[in-house]
Amino acid sequence: MPQQTSTYETGSWVPILQLIGPMADNYKQMFGNLPPEQSRDFAKTPLQSLKEIFPGLHYKPVCHDQTKCTSLHKNLVEKLSKDKDLIIAALGTGPVVESEFHDRTHLELPGQQKELLLDIMKY
């Protein structure tokens, strides 16, 4: 059977994409606490960039307090994770979690981000 060409580019199939995670649309947390001075015209969040490529991209915040992610909308994670062709998890830290003179003592994802990732994989 011949290999199917990339159907997204030909327009015959558009994947159902879901972006999940506290770093998906969090511009202030992207650069750390010593960011370069730059115009917002030159930097975009993952959500902004992916929306340009995939206009039908789905996104909804699932952490109550963004990057710290101390509280998670578990029911929403399950709902958003089902029936998607691809899920992109935008996880990590930012100045709200670690910064100069505010170092972490471990390398685990902050808050419930690890649980979020495991829940995404479960569904």
Image (cartoon, grey):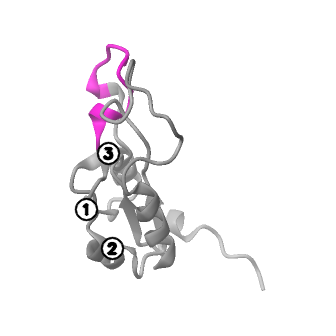
Give the secondary structure at mark 1: loop
Q: Total marks drawn? A: 3
**Residue to which mark 1 is pinned:** 60
**Residue to which mark 2 is pinned:** 80
* Residue 35 highlighted magenta (yes or no): yes
Q: Which residues are magenta?
A: 26-41
Amino acid type, residue under disc 1 in the picture: Lys
In the rendered structure, the answer to whether residue 108 lies left or right of residue 112 reads right
Where is residue 7? Give x, y as percent: 55, 71
Crowd around label 1: few <14 · some 14–19 · many ≥20 (10 Å) = some
Give the secondary structure at mark 3: helix
* Residue 3 highlighted magenta (yes or no): no
Compared to residue 9, the image places residue 50 above or below, namely above
Amino acid type, residue under disc 3 in the picture: Thr
Seen at 29% across and 53% down, the residue is 70
Seen at 41% across and 67% down, the residue is 17
**Residue to which mark 3 is pinned:** 67
Crowd around label 2: few <14 · some 14–19 · many ≥20 (10 Å) = many
Can you name the residue that lies furthest to the right here? Answer: 1
Tell me which label, 3 or 2, sits earlier in the chain.
3
